[in-house]
Image (tube, helix red, strand yellow):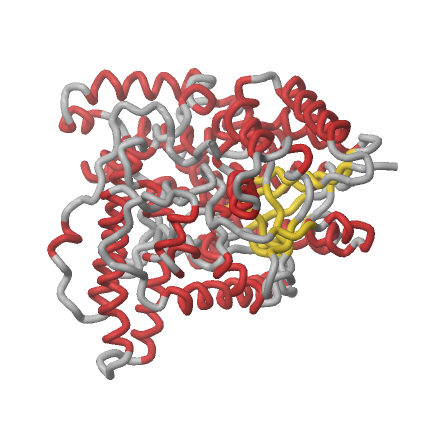
Amino acid sequence: MKKLNLILLWHMHQPDYRDYVTNEFVLPWVYLHAIKDYTDMAYHLEMHPQTKAVVNFVPVLLDQLEDFDEQFRTGEIRCPLLRLLAMPDLDQVTLQDRLYVFDSCFLSNHETMLNPYPAYKRLHELYEVFSKRGDRELTYFSGQYLGDLLVWYHLAWMGESVRRNNEFMMRLMAQSQEFSYEDRLQLFKLIGDLISGLIPRYRKLMETGQIELSTTPHYHPLAPLLIDFSSARDSQPDTGLPEHQYYPGGRSRVAFHMSSAITSHVRRFNEKPTGIWPAEGAISTALLKILAEHQCQWSASGEGVLANSLRASHPGESLPDRNHYLYRPYRIAGEIESVTCFFRDDQLSDLIGFEYAKWFGRDAAENFIQSLERIYHHTPADENPVVSVILDGENAWESYPYNGFYFLEDLYGMLDNHSYIRTTTYRDYLADPGNTANIQTLPALSAGSWVYGTFSTWIGDQEKNNAWDMLCAAKHSYDLVMQSDRLTEDKKMQASRQLASCESSDWFWWFGDYNPAHSVASFDQLFRKNLMNLYHLLKLPIPPAILAPISKGNGQTDTSGAMRRSS
């Protein structure tokens, strides 16, 4: 009987938020997503052992989760928000710390994470009244107000599975105000316990065969651009490029990120990853060659990349109906046929990422299943289609009521019992000899990402290109210093780690006036701080251009900027 193979790939990623000079976490998003999204996503899989999925952890995220685990074990907290949560006397905090609390503890989707809680909403209304009169007015807020605000922010960011199953959380939610220092300390401890249990939970799911764990080049670089800026012109021939013609030593840097990711994966999960989800689903022929050199069996990208590649492979011909090309795996003709490529269904992925948050959970789950059933009936009768749904496993749920709890519970429940839709993983799919006949050959690959099938989110406009030129200049300096005797071996290792963080795709994602100004300012500052730290480690003066902001963003946008539609 014909079957539809559904592969859900949940991509877990946060860039490196650590300042390597001070060792402080500049932003709290790693631990906040840990207690909200990584806990909930593990829970839903644990409650539905028949549902299979691929979970992709970027190594730099795992590095930071382990860093937080160590902070809780040693008591040496290097994250300002967590330090304040555990501070005994909040009446004694400085004005700077007060402003930091106010600036941090209302950052969320207010519709789903603030307004549903009357006590938290009241704290926000009080802040709105006093903040209009200037920062000095905020000194009149008591330590009790600050304590309640810190607790509520973490309650709002707590996973729904924790809120429903942890008695202490239930008590705090019911209490709603006048939280004591002991309450804050117990909440602080719960956060540490949740983080310390995360990697073991996912490892156990992997060991049972329910999930496949995949990885990404270590610091999430936009690998095709590191290798060759001109690959951006495969999909956009007229796009502008940085003044530097190429990123110095880019291919070797991508190989470094790959080797480091595999080493990280083996250390944490006791096996090599079978496949790679490249940062942003960005692939090129040159990158696939590197993946093949590292014995990777599969990779994946966006539907737009496949469409562009088919047009390049068959110029002058129109694309057939997507039911006749999207739902099968491909190998690229030539020397990289050892890597099988899968392409995400952009429409289904975007429904989860952007649309279903507005629906009742069960209605959304039923619509998703019905969409799969239509694919089943409209694909060739002699094929078992493979449908890839790939998206961010963390940011989408902030827009859902109850962190997507009802949608995921209903979806997994329906998939558990479906007669011809079966969830699987890429590794299991490729291990089944019956699926070999479904693999097609793609004569040409057009480089691109899951966003629009292009690299326009990371290169092309003036701000993004300026950032690339800053990074290229820093890499030239890095190469010269590393070839000299200026640094000790330990300092060289620190500089290498700092450079890797500078190479993350995330900095370039945020530059541009279509992103919210507050987020752009944070990531702009962090990128330039990383570059400054690199020059400091290289014992070189900081170029003046790095001192000025690269991008300002847009103060009018209503979106968070953390996610983007694929088309």
At x 68%, y 25%, the residue is 371
411 left or right, relative to 131 = right
Q: How many marks?
A: 0
Q: Nearer the viewer, residue 324 or 457?
A: 324
Q: Nearer the viewer, residue 315 or 71?
A: 315
* Percent of width and height locating residue 403: 54, 28
Please say if 54 is above or below 298: above
* Percent of width and height locating residue 138: 20, 26
Whether residue 142 can be seen here: yes
In this view, the residue farthest toward the front is: 316
At x 61%, y 58%, the residue is 333
Please say if 166 is above or below 18: above
476 left or right, relative to 226 = left
Please say if 2 is above or below 117: below
At x 42%, y 28%, the residue is 152
Say which quarter of the image contains residue 230: bottom left
